[in-house]
Image (spheres, helix red, strand yellow):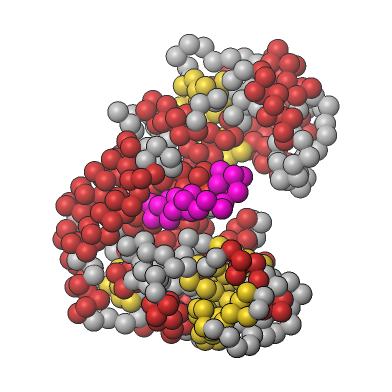
Amino acid sequence: MVRKLIKSLLEAKAYPEPTAGVRLIETHVSFIFVTDSFVYKVKKSVDYGFLDFTTLERRRFYCEEEVRLNRRLCPDLYLGVVELRRNSQGASFAGGGELLDYAVKMKRLPEERMLVHLLERGEAGVADMDRIARVVADFHAKALRSAQIDACGQTAVIRRNWEENFRQAAPFAGVTISACELADIRRWAERFLEQNEEQFRLRVAKGYIRECDGDLHSGNICLTDKVCIFDCIEFNERFRYIDTAADLSFLLMDLEYAGRPDLSEALLSAYQKAAGDREIGNLLPFYKTYRAFVRGKVTSFLLNDPDLPSTELAVKRETARRYFRLARGYTLRDRLKPSLVITCGLMGSGKSTLARELALELGFQLRRSDVLRKEVAGLPLQPVAEEYRGGIYNADMDRATYAALLAEAEEALKAGKGVVADATFRRAADREAFRALAAQLGVPCYTVETRCPELIIRQRLEARRGDASEVSDARWEHFHRQQAEFEAPQAGESIPVDSTLPLSTEADLVLRAMGLLP
């Protein structure tokens, strides 16, 4: 669709219903126009190999398929297929003129109740996972089965899907995924398919290959008085005729990408209880890897849009990189023991950024002293202005914060979960207490020490000022006082990391020291 037509569809008069405004959401396959009460979704004239919307007839057919298939889970949401016609101003969904295209028309859902936004605000909980699990399990139980659908559960078809992914991701090697990461994931997927051939056959034999949703993630789930799951895969039967484990894995992966492995575990537990599928866990690492890889690939496609602003381009590139890194992280976990990783470094040296990356890739629980300190003090998670070592940063609060951090690490490790403890760890005694815990529990402990020039630290700390979402209270005017009392690790005690390096390189240094990379 040419930009002139898009511009005309951002006018309220282009719609049959009154609306105060129109907002455009663009994906790699659609233009989505959001009015006050409705949503109009126009498919792009694109061919990615796995979908082909390049003719008007194809777009009409797949609009009708989208309505039909999505009414399985949201019967009242999808209103039908409408025509887009030319007028003197450009294009309109109201009135006559030359037929330009078709669109799916939907009722508008409350955006604040989308699961993706509930996760961002920290408002999604275990009860929500229970609700979603019951709906998905019931949907899977009723989903269509046939010999044609069963055929898509064969490893030959699954290999074809992977090969298509590798081929389409190859142009982004060196941009959003490294050539080594691409090769590592390929080798792992091929080996998994070879070693688990019988498991895949059993899933077919036991009836787990169904006409599923295919696009089950937090952006496609709205939680109001009922659970509405929308925007399934309509354009390719191969991506819809899948194992129910592959379907659920998308949302499990998505929750982990959002930093909520606890909710991923809760969803899986509730689903297994509702569906009675106790064998699903055997294939989840494989399908979660697949789902993360696909998200990385699809997000990378957006980088080819010449009209994408540079700031948005950078965000998309980083998003794709993190999905690919998560995919590679899943492939490492069969060699991974529950471990304790503690950060160590001066304020602004990149500890928290690297801690988040490691927790994402390894599937470890992330515990942050900045968060725990305010929870211990009974304060909201927002910046506070304190004197150095004053207020909630006095000696008593320091001891209480590190005690809470140690207790949470112990609880997680005893439950068999890896932990990344993100704190300054400026005192050698605090580091020793965590190493002693690891030794007591018989788990490996790694100290990751982040370093960078003072100029970079100052730039980072100054950039945080005024950021209401920032939990840390570190300020440049406190830096040299902290530096003066910092008890640096002795040689050989830590894994030193230069935090001016690309984040993927930093993480690989740690993974290599942990014996997970050659």
Image quadrant holding the C terminus, namely: top left
Q: Within the magenta stretch, is there residue 297?
A: yes
Asked which quadrant contains residue 483, the reply is: top right
- Apparent side of residue 85 relative to residue 153 in the rendered image (left or right): right
- Apparent side of residue 48 relative to residue 323 in the rendered image (left or right): left
Q: Nearer the viewer, residue 136 or 298?
A: 298
The number of numbered badges drawn on the structure is: 0
Instruction: Kindly give the residue lying farthest to the bottom in the view shown.
Output: 96
Q: Nearer the viewer, residue 51 or 119?
A: 51
- Apparent side of residue 255 relative to residue 403 in the rendered image (left or right): left
Q: Within the magenta stretch, is there residue 200?
A: no
Q: Does residue 490 appear anywhere in the picture?
A: yes
From the top left corner, tell me how far across and down residue 406 is, in percent.
Answer: 57, 35
Query: For the magenta stretch, what is the residue range?
Result: 293-315
From the top left corner, tell me how far across and down residue 179 is, in percent.
Answer: 33, 37
From the top left corner, tell me how far across and down residue 64 is, in percent.
Answer: 44, 83
Q: Does residue 319 appear anywhere in the picture?
A: no
Q: Nearer the viewer, residue 502 or 488?
A: 502
Q: Nearer the viewer, residue 507 or 390?
A: 507
What residue appears at the point 58 percent right and 85 percent down from the top-left corner? 97
Taking 146 as reference, is 258 above or below it? above
What residue appears at the point 50 percent right and 39 percent down from the top-left corner? 357
What residue appears at the point 72 percent right and 76 percent down from the top-left corner? 12
- Apparent side of residue 362 relative to residue 90 in the rendered image (left or right): left
From the top left corner, tell me how far across and down residue 25 is, in percent.
Answer: 59, 64
